[in-house]
Amino acid sequence: VRAPDLIARKRDGGELTADELEWLVSGYLAGAVSEGQIAALLMAGVLRGFTPEEARALTDVFVASGESVDLSVLDGPTIDKHSTGGVGDATTLLVAPLLAAAGARLVKLSGRGLGHTGGTLDKLEAIPGMRVDLSPAELLDVAREVGCVVAAQSAALVPADKAIYALRDVTATVAAPALIASSVMAKKLAAGAQTIVLDVKAGDGAFLPTVDAAVDLAQLCVTIGAEAGRRCSALVTAMDTPLGRAIGNAVEVAECATLLSAPPAGRLAEVALELAATALTLATGADDARARLERCWSSGAALERLAAMIAAQGGDAGVCDDPAGVLPAAPVVLPVLADRAGVVAALPARAVGELAAALGAGRARKDDAVDPAVGIVLEVDVGDEVARGDRLATVHARSDTAAEAAAERLRALVVLSDGPVAPPPTVLRRIG
Amino acid sequence: VRAPDLIARKRDGGELTADELEWLVSGYLAGAVSEGQIAALLMAGVLRGFTPEEARALTDVFVASGESVDLSVLDGPTIDKHSTGGVGDATTLLVAPLLAAAGARLVKLSGRGLGHTGGTLDKLEAIPGMRVDLSPAELLDVAREVGCVVAAQSAALVPADKAIYALRDVTATVAAPALIASSVMAKKLAAGAQTIVLDVKAGDGAFLPTVDAAVDLAQLCVTIGAEAGRRCSALVTAMDTPLGRAIGNAVEVAECATLLSAPPAGRLAEVALELAATALTLATGADDARARLERCWSSGAALERLAAMIAAQGGDAGVCDDPAGVLPAAPVVLPVLADRAGVVAALPARAVGELAAALGAGRARKDDAVDPAVGIVLEVDVGDEVARGDRLATVHARSDTAAEAAAERLRALVVLSDGPVAPPPTVLRRIG
């Protein structure tokens, strides 16, 4: 086998066997296949396409390259959840305690934010004392005691995926459905849960702009999960508008704590409930999953599980009762007021996410630090009527200059129209 | 400027500016742009295409990356010649002394063979004592004294092309017309001749199988040459059948010496004369170039210039009068006889080239050694009638086993038919 011949086959639209993909990827890790050869193969695959069989084979190669988490020691159904990344999307902080309150075990290994999308680990680390780097034993202990745990992925899992992803990131070869699916599903399979629910975002603020592309990716992921013997479903959800009202780290934690202290309301709550209900139905066969989860929410049981998880991971659980008293506050808080009356017609997710990242809530490069305190809190949603002078949003910033620039940009981003506007959708498609 | 953004633009079918290409290539040489990033860019370019403007810009970047040869110290018109590589294609050994005999100065920096195609340096090195690694001063001395010189390209020329070509070679990204044209033309521009004639092969044994692809490449090269202020023309010539009768190193040198000792005859002589005449016409404006060159050939002046060049480069010039007495001989020489009567309908160039390479005349990898003595001499051409038992070819091999295997394979490769067959064409198109 010669690497150039395999690359040429993909370049010419052919297919590689599982053995050939394994040979290339392990050769890359071992130094026998060069970075340039893998990069050329990835670009050929982005432009010519990888088949579902190739995606499955890559997933297997990635899983086999490292350790896997053994969740069989836990009682109760084990569940994992993955999102392709959105703006104002703190669903994990709701889904995890909801499923724990309903008797399942959610063990989620999460990532950090990059670009305009936020990352769950960054949000959790806004809570004073919170630890996300847990040992394998600690991970299982928290899952066993609390019912849910959200931690950083160990370096021992899917090292081949990490190496390939790092190369994709710098070679403009991220955007191939099979590469995305194999990277996502390898992480999920190695993380050990028997049930996997995927939230594939579609829209302006998502990695995939069109619903069709999101459905294709979701279908591919679900097939890979099912063939690996897992229960796997996906929701394609809308990401043209930020999902929650808060976009930032502390502000999103505060929003989740506040949401869980009252009956569920709003789009963020709706998507979280649907993801949790999908997972619980898959995992237990229950036909009343959604109703049970709503009871767990309204009774305060989910909020109590969130507090228990935070406490078990070293964080200040007081954040659940008094977010503002516990979370770091930005020194400058500036309201953004409507300069005319109208109906909110659009809150473009990507631009709002980029604005929050520019305030310091996100990172342009992987090793940048994030500012936990800054961000944006929207005070209106698409479809809301506003009068001149009404508050559209609040900017939480590190300086007056940053706050004013963000407020001006945000006012321009909020599209006001005169006619009535339908509220944004939530779940667009269900797969698996 | 970020490399991934430039790669993404090419991936999506866009165009890069001259400054952007310069930034990427010099960044690669300096280590700031990674091998993977250049490989991804190259594959995107192979699949999406580079524009003629990008080809010109890459040519400039390659030339500017190193030194150039200054031929202005030479009297008489300076000419260079390039072939995209063929089988049984020793035209340089004919064109160089022909042009020298006609009063021009041919300075050719040549390469080695790879795969099924031969290389001029390998052929010259079959001559005892012959040196192809000449210093810049030696190169000019031989050109001045003899009128022609064929030597290895100095490492100081087009280092960026060398680095990019080495990467293309291992990443299956050789086959993009703009990449081929920029690599070829950068070498020719840096080598300093005012007139450049290109032999772009088309057919089964050529790098480009179709005439259309060869015409496109020739047109691109000629345009790049003209825009750089050189006189530049190209011939597209047929490479479905080996051009000469000999395929190997010593056997091709012997064929050229023998050809030059009698009036021109056969396809190899025809292509060499056409290339030389095209160059001489371009360089001098002469309208009788072909007739002058035929006189230089038939008078023995060209053979005398070949002997002078060989002597000036340290080789045994006796090879011109007595090839068999001077050149290394293979220990096993085995005739291949026709097992039926018929008309030779095909001598597939690529397969014959691969067979000669397998005997040891060529190399699979760049650092393999070649065996100067081995090869194949065809005794018939396409269109010839043969009787059962007639000699089709002679195999020159290192061992009985190798000779017998090659003879058997060769007998199977020579296609015999019953009807009349037209002789193969030579020059298919003229560009510029």
Image (cartoon, coloured by chain):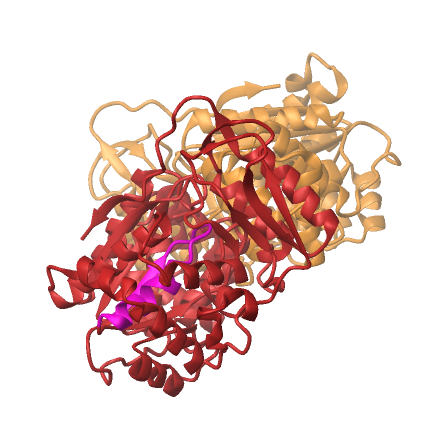
Chain colours: A orange, B red
Instruction: From the viewer's side, name the closer residue of A427 and A17.
Output: A17
Residue B94 % position (x, y): 35, 62
Residue under the image location 48 percent in, 38 percent down: B347
A244 horizontally vs B308: left or right: right
Instruction: From the viewer's side, name the closer residue of B71 and B398.
Output: B398
Quadrant placement of the N terminus of chain B: bottom left
Instruction: From the viewer's side, name the closer residue of A44 and A272.
Output: A44
The span picked out in magenta is B79-102
- Quarter of the image where one finds residue B68: bottom left
Q: Is residue B72 visible?
A: yes
A279 horizontally vs A211: left or right: right
Residue under the image location 30 percent in, 58 percent down: A405
Residue under the image location 50 percent in, 66 percent down: B323
Marker count (numbered): 0
Q: Is residue A192 above or below residue B101?
A: above
Residue B31 % position (x, y): 49, 70
Q: Is residue A286 above or below residue A202?
A: above
A339 horizontally vs B311: left or right: left
Confirm whether the magenta stretch covers residue B309: no
Residue A423 % position (x, y): 37, 25
- Quarter of the image where one finds residue B134: bottom left
Confirm whether the magenta stretch covers residue B90: yes
A159 horizontally vs A135: left or right: left
Residue B263 % position (x, y): 31, 57
Q: Is residue B60 visible?
A: no
In the picture as drawn, the residue positioned furthest to the top comes out as A287
Q: Is residue A391 above or below residue A216?
A: below
